[in-house]
Image (tube, helix red, strand yellow):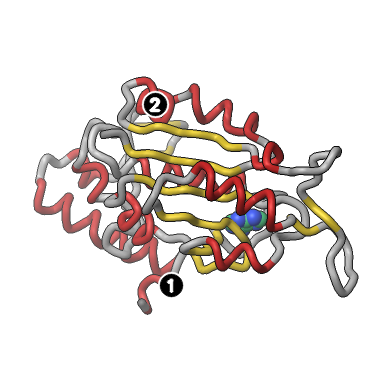
Amino acid sequence: MSYRFDVLTLFPALFDGLRHESLIGKALESQTITLELHNWRAFATDRHSTVDDAPFGGGAGLVIKPDPLVHCLRAVVPAGARTILLSPSGRRFEQKLAQEWAQLPGITLICGRYEGFDHRVEAHVDDVVSIGDFVLNGGEVAAMAIIEAVARLLPGVIGNAASLTEESFADGLLEYPQYTRPRDFEGQTVPDVLLSGNHAEIAKWRLAQRIARTRAMRPDLLKA
Ligand code: ADE
């Protein structure tokens, strides 16, 4: 059975690159995953296919109307699927959540635009998540980030399963620095220990590097 990604978006063409390139493209081709895009503008009922409107109470921008979106959700989402609204005011998406969602048969991601959703949409989804403390113009890029993070954990998407467990965040530390040829790049040389052939020393060096890197770049991870 394919893992199923459903995406509700007003801008499906934004996913063209993702669909055709690299590991996600290959996973789609081999039907390890499926990716269905649904434009909920098709569920608008007025002459102008209106999907947004002015906020009650006033304020800048437009708010996504609940009715076409929720009608679309009901029509396209497989029974029992996990539905996730993408919003900068959601809880933080992290590797742990990617691992959890990779165990499901699929997920449905809902991409916003404009100033946000009518709050009542939240009652019709299972989760609201943000990919970080910054504001995008819409949820599409966030959805693509989540699709990549989840898809690469699925069996058959990445050739080397060991490369998954060794990575940053699998155990709360950032990755150790990697080197390949040439041994001397414009005077920057590869650390001697990596050329020593001593695997115990290499493992020790890599762990020390991971801790030092995490302390320098992400001290918050060490505290947790
Ligand atoms: N939509 C706009 N900004 C977002 C963010 N940071 N995460 C998820 N969805 C978003």
Residue 177 higher or lower than 169, as above or below:
above
Q: Nearer the viewer, residue 67 or 145?
A: 67
Q: Which residue is mark 2?
A: 28
Q: Residue at x 38, y 64 (%)?
A: 214
Residue type indicated by callout 1? Pro
Query: Looking at the image, which residue is at 24% across and 50% down?
Result: 166
Q: Is residue 121 left or right of residue 115?
A: left
In the rendered image, residue 219, in percent from the top left (x then y), is placed at 43, 72
Q: Are marks 2 and 1 in contact (CB under 8 Å)?
A: no
2 or 1: mark nearer the eye: 2
Q: Residue at x 44, y 36 (%)?
A: 187
Where residue 86 sits in the image (x, y, percent)? 58, 56
Q: Which label was assigned to residue 50?
A: none
Q: On the picture, is 214 further left or further right than 117?
A: left
Is 143 placed left or right of 167 in the picture? right
Q: In what quadrant of the picture does the C terminus appear?
A: bottom left
Nearer-the-camera pick, 22 or 6: 6
Which residue corresponds to the image point at 35% horizontal and 28% vertical from the top-left? 27
- Identify the image quadrant of the N terminus: top left
Q: Position of residue 149 (x, y in %)?
A: 40, 46
Residue type beneath disc 2 = Leu
Question: Closer to the N terminus: mark 2 or mark 1?
Answer: 2
Residue 47, horizontal then vertical, whole percent: 85, 38
Q: Quadrant of residue 161?
A: top left
* Image quadrant, ligand 1: bottom right
Q: Secondary structure at mark 2?
A: helix
| Category of crowding for the residue at label 2, using alpha-carbon neighbours closer than 10 angstroms: few (below 14), some (14–19), many (at least 20) | some
Q: Which residue is mark 1?
A: 219
C-alpha separation, residue under disc 2 versus residue under disc 1: 38 Å
